[in-house]
Amino acid sequence: MRFFLFFFFFFSFLHAANMDDKKISMRLGYGVADINNLGYILVGDHQRYEEDTALINLDTGYRISQQFNDWPLDIYVKGSLSYFKEKDVLNYETGKESEDFLEAVVYIKAYLNLDFSDNRLRIGVGEGLSFAKEVPIVEVYDALQQDGIGPTSKILNYLDVSFDIDVGRLFSVDALRDTYLGYTIKHRSGIFGLFNGVKGGSNYNMITIEKNF
């Protein structure tokens, strides 16, 4: 919670400092692993992984297109770092207890802006590459379920799907305008074997707060 409060107040200060261009985005998120596949999660069917794993995500981006082709569509180039909290969780592949580790992601993300009654709801979809220092435990579990410990990989395809709302517009607080509170699915996968033969992957449900400035 302290991370989110710091994020709110720091970027409210930046907003007050008259940074009007707003091509930069920064997002902070906290998430937990879900063992259901992406399709089930998108329709609201969630099942948290039984082990005590989680991640903290810091994401930044630069807007390269606004109202793309006259659509209410903004496009960003983005990068993120995630800290996976998996210390002392048993890794079924190695038979050893795992450690905390970092993941880096580079991707492009498009946001569809839906404006109504002075509010803004965004639907975002991002695509890129994920580089993890270790294979997340939930991916090892997924490989075990599919193939009795099939291949895993530290480098996989990355998909980012988000739904958020502008809390400044929602509550008529100018200092919080272009601050978005929402839900994000963080997805790594081998795209049915295209990445090092990996057929599965992992999904994390994240609560996020993002600021454009």
Image (tube, rainbow, N blue to C red):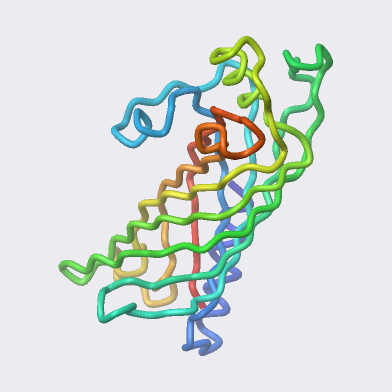
- Front residue of this view, candidates 32 and 132: 132
What residue is drawn where x is 43% and y is 71%?
75
Q: Position of residue 97 (x, y in %)?
A: 82, 18
From the viewer's perspective, tell me whether residue 124 is left or right of residue 108.
left
- Front residue of this view, candidates 40 and 129: 129
What residue is drawn where x is 36% and y is 68%?
168
* Location of residue 105 (image quadrant): bottom right
Q: Position of residue 208 (x, y in %)?
A: 49, 51
Q: Position of residue 184 (x, y in %)?
A: 45, 46
What residue is drawn where x is 50% and y is 27%?
34
Q: Position of residue 211 (x, y in %)?
A: 50, 67
In the rendered view, would you say 120 is above or below 37? below
From the viewer's perspective, tell me whether residue 167 is left or right of residue 20.
left
In the rendered view, would you say 42 is above or below 181? above
What residue is drawn where x is 39% and y is 25%?
46
From the viewer's perspective, tell me whether residue 195 is left or right of residue 12.
right
Number of disc labels: 0
In the rendered view, would you say 195 is above or below 181? above
